[in-house]
Image: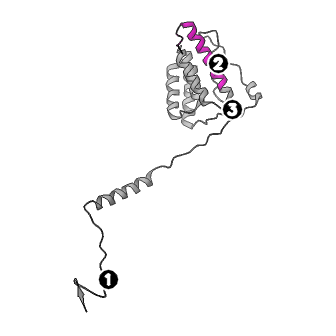
Amino acid sequence: MLLVNGMSANEPPPVRAVVGPHSGKAFAGFLLLLWLAGCAEQPVIRKQPASVSRPAATAAKQPPAKSGKRASSAKEIPQVSASREKSPTLASPPVVALMADADKNRASGQLDNAAALLERAIRIQPRNAELWHRLAAIRLEQHQPGLARDLARKSSLLAQGDPVLREKNQAIVEAATHALGNSGDTPQR
């Protein structure tokens, strides 16, 4: 039997692992990444309908807005309906709860609390046009017509497939512009 480097000719050479000064750290990092990838949640992708068609009859069935003495201008401040038949952006359960709380606060005259709740809902669901509209209506009631007008315009941009909401937003824009015209705070554009 012939020995070469202390091994016989019939034995296969031993398998040597490539071991470097950082190979243990790299392997531990790889295991950490695998573990984190297994713990991560998959993103939820919600598809929004391209447009929601509303028959003309449903718009006529809506109850007329209540006339309150909160409006400071000649135009009536549009009231926000508590429940809509369909919304282009479906609200998640936390957003629905925040909207309901905001409606209660608004009805009891706590406009600051209602606005804060809607702002929180907007942070959860920033592409919900209804939230922006409701906040615009509250800002108009709070005598902040410039902000109300800007919020209503933002809502209209998001409500491309909702002509009813766009009309409500236009009413807020007109009321805000009228209020700005009466106060002399008309912006230069």
Q: Are marks 1 and 3 in contact (CB under 8 Å)?
A: no
> Dots 2 and 1: beta carbons under 8 Å?
no
Is residue 149 depicted above or below 28 in this figure?
Answer: above
Majority secondary structure of magenta residues: helix
Q: Residue at x 43, y 53 (%)?
A: 37
Indicate the colouring scheme: one colour
> What amino acid is labelled 2 in the image?
Ala
Who comes first in sequence, dot 2 or dot 3?
A: 3
**Quarter of the rendering occupied by the N terminus:** bottom left
**Residue that mark 1 sits on:** 12
Establish if 135 lies above or below 88. Answer: above
As helix, strand or loop, the secondary structure at mark 2 comes to helix
Task: Identify the secondary structure beneath mark 3.
Answer: loop
Check disc 3 and report the residue beneath it.
85
Separation of disc 2 and disc 1 at Cα?
87 Å
Q: Which residue is mark 2?
A: 171
CA gap, disc 2 to disc 3?
A: 20 Å
* Magenta segment: 166-189
- Residue 120 higher or lower than 79, as above or below: below
Q: Is residue 179 magenta?
A: yes
